[in-house]
């Protein structure tokens, strides 16, 4: 004869009793506790000995009992075989936890109600995480509104005095040119150059701030982007003699205008930092792995010292003087932000006087 202690039913009950992530208990027809596993002891705080025979309604808040929530759940479980519910439950020490409960009715061979199985999961941590995420989203929305306000101020209030300064410089040159000596004209030149520089810095900051503002994502053909850029930059490319090589680049899912900006900055960077006595060359490739398209923009330009490889992606960071190379240290910071908007990262591999390879990744999953 088979030993009951090793029967499938007893083994199943033993397994259920050892589970700690869920409170598993069996109730009789009236809601009295019949059995209690380790998970129930851990979540609710009662031992199996002290809980047996207790009314399960004690696990509900006073308000829930007034509203007959536990009774209604048993009634619904009886009618529909199973019912689920989320709400606050009470531990032995009086503390509350957020629970997800499944109550299933159990019948004997004659279809007579024997009682209920009750599975309870403590979702307090999940609830707190959701609350924290909502609060973060609220703060992020607030910060975005502040940023929008900043963009408005920068595009109007900061630009206006610069325009005024430039206009008065023009008037001074036109109406009082004969009164200025060499030093006076030099001072006007410095003022004019500084206001022009400020104008471009503000524009660069505005462009950087606007990156990531709501825009539809779409399928973007990288080959078409490069064809457009080669046409738009045709004069600079022709003047430098640069050769741009690429073939069979992918169609990616992203922000079309931002990706065009990314490619534009990287091509312009190679044009700007080319060697004086070497025909510039830029080779663009893309390789796919499980999650990303990995792009390389490899040139044969002046290269970058190793200690500056991180610095170049910070906004307004320059490695060269304006006399040697034009620019305001904005382009690569834009590249970094655009790549991060697409779930990737960007870095550079470079050898001084031998060239640089800008490497970046873009998520290849449309759902990302």
Image (spheres, rainbow, N blue to C red):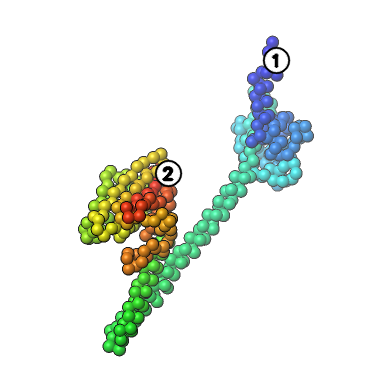
Outermost residue toward the top in this view: 1
Q: Nearer the viewer, residue 192 or 156?
A: 192
Can residue 210 be seen in the rendering of this structure? no
Q: Nearer the viewer, residue 243 or 309?
A: 309
Where in the figure is residue 135, as x and y percent of width and height?
Answer: 57, 54
In the rendered image, which quarter is residue 12 located in?
top right
Q: Is residue 319 above or below residue 347?
A: below
**Rendering coords of residue 74 (x, y %):** 67, 35
Where in the figure is residue 364, as x and y percent of width and height? Answer: 39, 43
Quadrant showing the N terminus:
top right
- Kindly identify the residue that appears in the image at 34 percent across and 64 percent down: 327
Is mark 1 in CB contact (under 8 Å) with mark 2? no
Asked which secondary structure carries label 1, the reply is loop
Res. 367 mark = 2
- Tell me what residue is drawn at x 32 percent, y 68 percent: 323
Q: Position of residue 316 (x, y in %)?
A: 41, 64
SS at badge 2: loop
* Sequence-wise first label, 1 or 2: 1
Q: Is residue 337 left or right of residue 76?
A: left
> Farthest residue toward the right?
50
């Amino acid at each position: 004869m088979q030993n009951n202690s090793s029967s499938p039913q007893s083994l199943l009950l033993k397994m259920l009793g050892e589970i700690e992530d869920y409170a598993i208990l069996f109730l009789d027809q009236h809601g009295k506790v019949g059995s209690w596993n380790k998970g129930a002891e851990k979540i609710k705080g009662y031992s199996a000995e002290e809980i047996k025979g207790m009314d399960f309604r004690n696990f509900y808040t006073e308000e829930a009992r007034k509203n007959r929530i536990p009774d209604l759940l048993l009634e619904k479980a009886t009618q529909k075989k199973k019912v689920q519910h989320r709400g606050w439950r009470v531990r032995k020490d009086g503390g509350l936890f957020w629970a997800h409960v499944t109550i299933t009715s159990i019948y004997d061979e004659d279809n007579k109600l024997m009682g209920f199985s009750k599975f309870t999961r403590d979702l307090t941590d999940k609830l707190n995480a959701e609350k924290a995420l909502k609060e973060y989203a609220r703060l992020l929305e607030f910060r975005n509104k502040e940023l929008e306000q900043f963009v408005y101020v920068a595009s109007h209030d900061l630009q206006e005095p610069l325009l005024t300064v430039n206009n008065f410089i023009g008037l001074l040159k036109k109406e009082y040119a004969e009164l200025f000596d060499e030093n006076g004209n030099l001072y006007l030149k410095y003022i004019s150059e500084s206001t022009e520089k400020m104008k471009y810095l503000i524009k660069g900051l505005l462009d950087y701030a606007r990156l990531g503002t709501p825009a539809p994502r779409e399928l973007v053909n990288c080959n078409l982007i490069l064809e457009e850029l080669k046409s738009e930059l045709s004069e600079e490319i022709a003047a430098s003699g640069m050769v741009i090589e690429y073939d069979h680049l992918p169609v990616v899912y992203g922000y079309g205008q931002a990706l065009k900006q990314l490619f534009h900055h990287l091509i312009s960077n190679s044009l700007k930092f080319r060697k004086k006595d070497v025909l510039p060359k830029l080779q663009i490739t893309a390789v796919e792995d499980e999650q990303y398209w990995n792009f390389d923009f490899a040139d044969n330009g002046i290269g970058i010292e190793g200690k500056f490889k991180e610095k170049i992606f910070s906004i307004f960071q320059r490695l060269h003087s304006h006399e040697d190379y034009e620019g305001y240290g904005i382009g690569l910071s834009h590249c970094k932000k655009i790549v991060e908007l697409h779930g990737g990262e960007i870095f550079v591999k470079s050898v001084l006087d031998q060239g640089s390879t800008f490497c970046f990744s873009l998520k290849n999953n449309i759902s990302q």
